[in-house]
Amino acid sequence: MTYLNKILKTIPILAVSAFLYSLIMRDMVAMYIHPRFTMLTLITALGLFLVGVSFLRPDRKRLHEHATPWAILLVVALPVVLGWMVPPRPLGASAMENREVNYATLSSNAVSRATTQEFSSGEKTILDWLSQFGTGPAASFNGEEATLVGFVYYDDLFESDTFMVSRFIVSCCTADGSPVGLIVRYEGSDQLPLDQWVEISGTFEAQDFNGTDIPILQVTELKEIEPPRQPYLYP
């Protein structure tokens, strides 16, 4: 194997290492996996770097000739190419189409087993409120104030002044993401694009939705925002 071939086979391994390291440096690991795996990602990046550099050692020539087929390296390189070319975007409304959300109880399968992290703002998240709604009748939350961040989701069940402010719970990676959301009423709902991230404030009021009384947030203030750096809620 020529030295040039060794370099060409080393490049995909080092590219994966560089890509993983760049995710950490750009604080974008959370776009793909739970932040608790950041250290493992760093260790993986370092390990791949050492493996790639070791390929250049002259005494490893015979091993590389038999253990590093080009097809395997191409498979390794493909996710890296896609990762660099396609900017990561958080799960949104389109992903909710394929996941179950129970509007009657304003919960998903993940609510009953998840607890959220505390954010620096100290505000309760969507999931925090959903967990509390199971502790008493809808009317007991009348007048409670809330400030929430999430993306806009519409459903055929919603009236023209209604949408759901939504987030995804991620336990491991985005593949296991479960949607949660709160129904809100806002006079300008029909002007909000699907998937638009918003920060909303208002008060809860028990109202009928699809035959069930539930706490619905009456929005008093709404701001369109960019997706947060950590778009998901983590158990």
Image (spheres, rainbow, N blue to C red):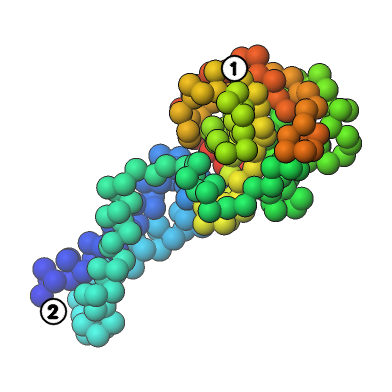
Q: Does residue 207 lie above or below 211 as drawn?
A: above
The answer to which of marks 2 and 1 sits earlier in the sequence is 2
The count of marks equals 2
Query: In screen coordinates, is 197 left or right of 65?
Result: right
Q: Amino acid at mark 1?
A: Glu
Decide which of 24, 125 is in the foreground and name it: 125
**Left or right of 200: which side holds 74?**
left
Q: CA distance from mark 2 to mark 1?
A: 69 Å
**Picture layout, residue 232 above or below residue 143:** below
Q: Position of residue 63 (x, y in %)?
A: 26, 83
Asked which secondary structure carries label 1, the reply is loop
Identify the residue shown where x is 26% and y is 70%: 73
Categorize mark 2 by other alpha carbons within 10 Å: few (<14), some (14-19), many (20+). few
Q: Amino acid at mark 2?
A: Met
Residue 176 at x, y percent in the picture: 57, 56
Residue 52 quadrant = bottom left
> Is residue 104 positioned above or below 217 on the image?
below
Is the N terminus in the top left, top right, bottom left or bottom right quadrant?
bottom left
- Residue carrying label 1: 187
Residue 228, numbered label: none
Name the residue rendered at 58%, 53% in the picture.
Answer: 99
Q: Which residue is mark 2?
A: 1
